Amino acid sequence: MSRSPLDILTRLVTKPARLVCGIMSGTSVDAVDVALVRLKGSGPSLEVEQIHFAETLYAEELQQRIFNNCEVASSNINDICLLHTAITHVYADAVRATCRECDIALEEVDLIGMHGQTLRHLPEAVHIAGHDICSTLQIGSGPTLSTLLRIPVVYDFRAGDMALGGQGAPLVPYVDHLLFQSEAEDRVLLNIGGIANLTLLPRGGGISDALAFDTGPGNMLVDALMRKYYGREFDEDGVVASSGTVNSDLLSWMLQHPFFRQNPPKSTGRESFGEDYLDDLLNIARELSVLDISDIVATVSECTVRSISMQLRALLPSPYRFRLLLSGGGARNHFFTDGLRYSFPEATVESTSAFGVAPESKEALAFAVLANEWLVGNAANLPAATGAKRAALLGALAIPA
């Protein structure tokens, strides 16, 4: 016998603890991350127990279709329409596999938070039909996923913030504050995915004191070079970057990008640092006679470190005594981590695993938390970070058909 949406929501809201699945596939376009967590309470009283984390690599054909449809010149409306559903099936398979790996029945999962796969993010206003329009597109159907798995799904997390004039990004800072705020020290949460983003949590501060923004490319350009020239998905441990020599002229050209000097709120993606930017970068490298690919990888990697460091220095007083907590794939890249330690010798630089959150799982875990916050009615954006007019409830709910 089917239950009404009211029955489903009443059961979920009144449970003392919920088993929630967070799904994240980021701008690196390498895999689907699934975090299965048990959540008790919400907001400042939230208790989090991570049960399992699993990563499902994208099939090469699907990955290439996503890359193609992130670029204006190679996108295809039929492909985008098909990908919207195809990715949903991949997400469903990833959730089923995650539950099997930790021997939990799918029926035990109470709720799913699904971010979706970003194809396009346009935070700068364009005038259309008498309105100034900003928009973002994350494909992956919440209603389809909910029906495939017979589990309620919270999805479309960015739309509410953008409707209020925000950029719809970054969204993880609310969760960073819940999990990592300290009374004793300043903390910076730095996620180095395809795009890098940071959250500054001043010691003893409240949620309104947090500051967050995208800093620019994280792994995105390095990964693209590795695929193009080495046939690998990423620079494992930063070995290729460490074998090359940073070219100061090429680095200087990269650091002139206006995004690095833009004041927050700000967010970015493949629109600014995708294939077109990579083509320009390689053309400039040839003009400068930078022909060794390892030197280009080193320079691009150094740009990630420098762009993060210079923007972070602008936020904090010297001496830079704070705790820098790293997450994302870039937390495993020694070129990045060594560079950040060199940039901030008086800071403590470590991964979020020091606080019980595996660096590769933090963003998927965050969307499980955001789904739970939606369920209990807690606004979860940071207007100071996104530029929204006010705090907002993030997400929409899909109930199994």
Image: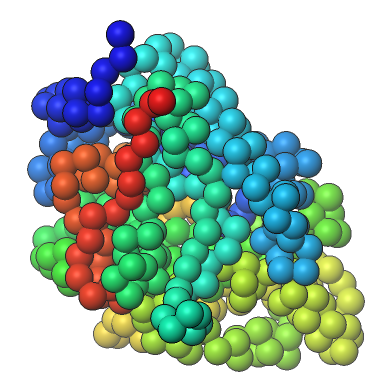
Q: Position of residue 324 (x, y in %)?
A: 36, 63
Which residue lies at the image location 34% right of the left edge and 22% below the top edge?
A: 109
Q: Is residue 46 left or right of residue 149?
A: left
Which quarter of the figure has residue 112? top left
In this picture the colour scheme is rainbow
Q: Is residue 257 above or below residue 196?
A: below
Which residue lies at the image location 65% right of the left edge and 47% below the top edge?
A: 81
Q: Position of residue 72 (x, y in %)?
A: 71, 68
Q: Number of callouts in the render? A: 0
Quadrant where the N terminus lies?
top left
Report the front residue among 102 and 131. 131
Report the front residue among 299 and 371. 371
Q: Is residue 341 above or below residue 251?
A: above
Q: Is residue 73 left or right of residue 200?
A: right
Q: Is residue 77 above or below residue 271?
A: above
Which residue lies at the image location 44% right of the left edge and 66% below the top edge?
A: 197
Q: Position of residue 257 (x, y in %)?
A: 60, 87
Q: Position of residue 172 (x, y in %)?
A: 34, 56
Which quarter of the figure has residue 75? bottom right
Which residue lies at the image location 13% right of the left edge and 36% below the top edge?
A: 41
Is residue 93 shown to the viewer in this render?
yes
Residue, far front: 129
Report the front residue among 68 and 245. 68
Quadrant where the C terminus lies?
top left
Is residue 211 shown to the viewer in this render?
no
Q: Is residue 340 left or right of residue 39?
A: right
Report the front residue among 145 and 226. 145
